[in-house]
Amino acid sequence: MTRHAPALVQIEGHESSWTIQRGNLRCNVVGLKDGGTCLYSPVEKTSKVVGEAAPIRFLLAPNHYHNKAVLEHIEAFPQAEPVCSDKARPRLEKITGTTFGSLTELANALPDHVTILEPDGLKTGEVWFRLQGDDGVTWIVTDAFCGVSEKKAPETTLGFLKTFPKYGLADKKVFSAWVQKQLKAETPNMIVPCHGGIVRGTDLKIDILALLEQL
């Protein structure tokens, strides 16, 4: 079987956002107001490809586990600022030896249709992006959800990363309540996870609530 080289692919419905998948891992590239971009969860051995979306302004480590490719991308894009949540910063800086800025400057640089979400009830300092498009809302998530592909199933379904309940959750009730609050305001019609395939559908609220019950 021939392996295709990773390539930037536009996220459906979002002209200034792209995704790149290497194996089961995904990095997302989101455009900024000034024409630059932010890398959401840099993935190893993809710096040359994501460089096609330069200039790279920010490198976002979206939780304290997503750190393996940070140094590669800092070397490739020395002008980019590494950023993370306050909760993720201590472990990230200890492991990488790099200083990470806050999310404030990144938030100010994002266009109006992109906002930062910080889920409650997690211990990893996970950060999500919310993208408002013409056809609905997209969530870009880290480890809380993943895309599950079965050989016999034609579509990718939503699941939890196997390690998430044990290593990601601090308080399952708090996290569940936070997600349900988001769903009362709106339901995403697409979820772009860092692990697995992209999940689309009009019934994602039902799928998400069913997963929360499993916690």
Image (cartoon, rainbow, N blue to C red):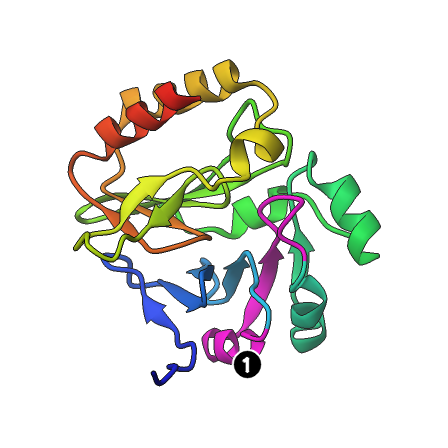
Q: Residue at x 16, y 55 (%)?
A: 154
Q: Nearer the viewer, residue 162 or 41?
A: 162
According to the image, label 1 marks what residue?
48
Q: Is residue 35 above or below residue 85?
A: below
**Residue 27 lies within the magenta run:** no
Magenta stretch, residue numbers: 45-67
Residue 81, given in percent of the width and then of the height, sits at: 67, 60
The amino acid at mark 1 is Lys
Number of on-image labels: 1
Q: Nearer the viewer, residue 17 or 172?
A: 172
Q: Residue at x 24, y 59 (%)?
A: 12
Secondary structure of the residue carrying tag 1 is helix
Residue 207 falls left or right of residue 128: left
Residue 195, given in percent of the width and then of the height, sits at: 45, 53
Quadrant in which residue 151 is drawn? bottom left
Residue 106 falls left or right of residue 134: right
Kindly tell me whether residue 171 is visible in this rendering: yes
Residue found at the very far front of the displayed protein? 152
Residue found at the very far bottom of the displayed protein? 2
Q: Is residue 103 above or below residue 212?
A: below
Locate the C terminus by quadrant.
Answer: top left
Residue 66, given in percent of the width and then of the height, sits at: 62, 52
